[in-house]
Image: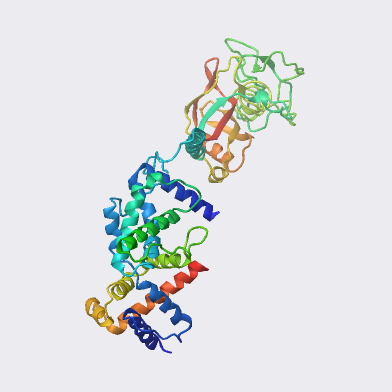
């Protein structure tokens, strides 16, 4: 029943966005982490992943009118665009010509990508101080000492915030899977 | 392992991950799960990237609600089914009507809880009351301030008016104008009137006495008996028996001059008890109510409230032949909750 409601809501959102492009925002919110996680798993750097993610959404917005609802989730359509975008980039670099999509299931989802996308979304639910530590540690790749200097607490306190954040994310991931 | 050593251990492994070094694969449980999460977090997008891309796409960073609302965002994005619209409209109209009706009902109900006495109505309703076990009529007193009670005897003549009151002891043997002594009783009434005059109810046979009043007996006025007035018996005014006049047949109705409304009793107000109390009383020639009693009771303290109020009333007395007379009346006191 929940899946059916989600499907109906997604269809309504797509129809709304096809009539008014400003309505694309909700589709973007729902699928940003998925697309990024799909791409970042297949490319080497964060910069390239962000560049390709941007390309996917621009392409999707431009081609939104061509989307026809056939019972397949909107994310699967975005994954197909993402795969094409990655392939184009590789072909230009003459490295590889086909993006492996074997891991996608019947619904067009990749379990590993879904898990990672969910994790990225869960970051927003952390308390501010824990979220700051996670971004500085993993995105900016600062050391504990550097973070402690910027945030003023002791290094031990920063380690504790890092631990608490990871612990909280683990609990939330497990609860989502259960 | 203590918490501090756990923090250090996690940070050591995270540091190895970020620097591309091998991590300790012997960890299990919570720490192993955290390291798996840490591997994914290495690919976390920059916090401002999502908002930047949204700005590039020229879509609002905070999406507006797109589900249909009555007048808000999203209206017009979805097909409108006329049946749904009509059903919704009818439902809203019904709800508004229900709210309006309930408001009116509440106001009306609230008014009903406010106790008040509508008015007191002076009326003659004796024809509607059950008949009394004994027939009452007018009556009169008598007497002549004698030390002895009136002696037994026959009643004088009955007449609609009285010129000379009856007397047994004649003080004026030679009056200039003579008239037969009478009592005010309708001439149609037939009673034995043979023998010397006197009070038929007296047990004293002699010596002759007029009694202590003005006619024959202990009352006042020119009648016979213990009452007041020119009639016969213990009552008021003319006629025979214990009663006063009734309104009609030449007797005008008394008119209330001062008639404050009774108070509602607390008990009746709480019980939302309402109805009519009927009081029987005699309005004397002095304009005051006398001999009050409850003819129809309502209970819950309302009878007492009615009596208490009517006792303070003042009337313009009933008139017969231009003279104030006592009349019996019924007074309705209508207790209503509005």
Asked if residue B135 is positioned above or below residue B3 in the image, the reply reads: above
- Which residue is more in the foreground, B71 or B66? B66
Residue A155 screen position, x and y as percent: 28, 83
- Which residue is more in the foreground, B221 or A32? A32
User: On the rendered structure, is B76 left or right of B104?
Assistant: left
Display coloring: rainbow
Q: Give the residue at x 52% y 16%.
A: B322
- Please identify the quadrant where the N terminus of chain B is shown: bottom left
- Numbered-mark total: 0
- Which residue is more in the foreground, B116 or A74? A74
Asked if residue A155 is positioned above or below residue A119 in the image, the reply reads: below
The image quadrant of residue B56 is bottom left
Residue B298 screen position, x and y as percent: 62, 38
Q: Give the residue at x 34% y 58%.
A: A88
Residue A69 screen position, x and y as percent: 47, 47
Q: Is residue B139 visible?
A: no
- Residue at the extreme top of the image, as rendered: B177
User: On the rendered structure, is B156 left or right of B38?
Assistant: right
Q: Give the residue at x 53% y 39%.
A: B308
Q: Is residue B265 visible?
A: yes
The image quadrant of residue A93 is bottom left
The image quadrant of residue B327 is top right
């Amino acid at each position: 029943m929940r899946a059916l409601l989600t499907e109906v809501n997604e269809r309504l959102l797509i129809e709304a966005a096809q009539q008014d492009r400003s309505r694309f925002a909700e589709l973007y919110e729902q699928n940003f982490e998925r697309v990024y996680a799909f791409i970042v798993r297949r490319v080497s750097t964060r910069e390239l992943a962000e560049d390709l993610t941007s390309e996917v959404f621009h392409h999707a917005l431009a081609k939104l009118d061509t989307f026809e609802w056939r019972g397949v989730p909107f994310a699967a359509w975005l994954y197909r665009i993402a795969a094409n975008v990655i392939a184009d980039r590789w072909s230009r670099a003459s490295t590889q010509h086909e993006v492996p999509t074997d891991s996608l299931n019947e619904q067009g989802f990749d379990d590993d990508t879904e898990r990672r996308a969910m994790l990225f979304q869960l970051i927003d639910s952390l308390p501010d101080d824990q979220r700051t530590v996670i971004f500085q540690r993993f995105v900016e790749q600062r050391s504990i000492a550097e973070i402690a200097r910027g945030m003023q607490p002791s290094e031990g306190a920063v380690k504790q915030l890092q631990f608490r954040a990871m612990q909280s994310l683990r609990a939330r991931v497990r609860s989502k899977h259960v | 392992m203590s918490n501090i050593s756990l923090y250090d251990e996690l940070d050591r492994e995270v540091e190895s991950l970020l620097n591309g070094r091998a991590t300790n694969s012997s960890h299990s449980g919570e720490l192993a799960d955290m390291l798996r999460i840490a591997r994914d977090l290495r690919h976390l997008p920059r916090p401002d990237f999502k908002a930047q891309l949204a700005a590039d796409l020229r879509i609002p960073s905070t999406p507006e609600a797109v589900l249909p609302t009555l007048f808000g965002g999203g209206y017009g994005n979805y097909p409108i089914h006329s049946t749904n619209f009509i059903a919704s409209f009818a439902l809203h109209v019904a709800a508004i009507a229900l709210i309006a009706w309930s408001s009116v009902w509440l106001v009306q109900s609230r008014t009903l809880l406010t106790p008040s006495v509508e008015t007191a109505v002076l009326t003659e309703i004796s024809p509607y009351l059950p008949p009394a076990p004994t027939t009452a009529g007018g009556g009169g007193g008598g007497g002549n301030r004698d030390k002895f009670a009136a002696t037994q005897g026959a009643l004088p003549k009955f007449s609609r008016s009285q010129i000379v009151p009856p007397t047994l002891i004649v003080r004026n043997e030679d009056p200039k104008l003579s008239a037969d002594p009478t009592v005010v009783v309708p001439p149609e009434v037939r009673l034995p009137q043979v023998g010397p005059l006197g009070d038929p109810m007296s047990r004293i046979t002699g010596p002759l006495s007029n009694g202590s009043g003005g006619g024959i007996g202990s009352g006042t006025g020119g009648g016979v008996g213990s009452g007041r007035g020119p009639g016969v018996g213990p009552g008021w005014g003319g006629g025979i028996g214990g009663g006063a006049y009734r309104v009609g047949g030449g007797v005008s109705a008394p008119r209330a001059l001062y008639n404050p409304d009774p108070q509602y009793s607390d008990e009746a107000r709480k019980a939302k008890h309402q109805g009519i109390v009927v009081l029987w009383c005699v309005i004397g020639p002095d304009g005051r109510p006398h001999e009050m009693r409850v003819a129809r009771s309502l209970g819950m303290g309302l009878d007492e409230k009615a009596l208490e109020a009517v006792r303070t009333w003042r009337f313009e007395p009933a008139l017969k032949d231009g003279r104030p007379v006592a009349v019996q009346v019924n007074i309705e006191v209508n207790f209503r909750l509005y």
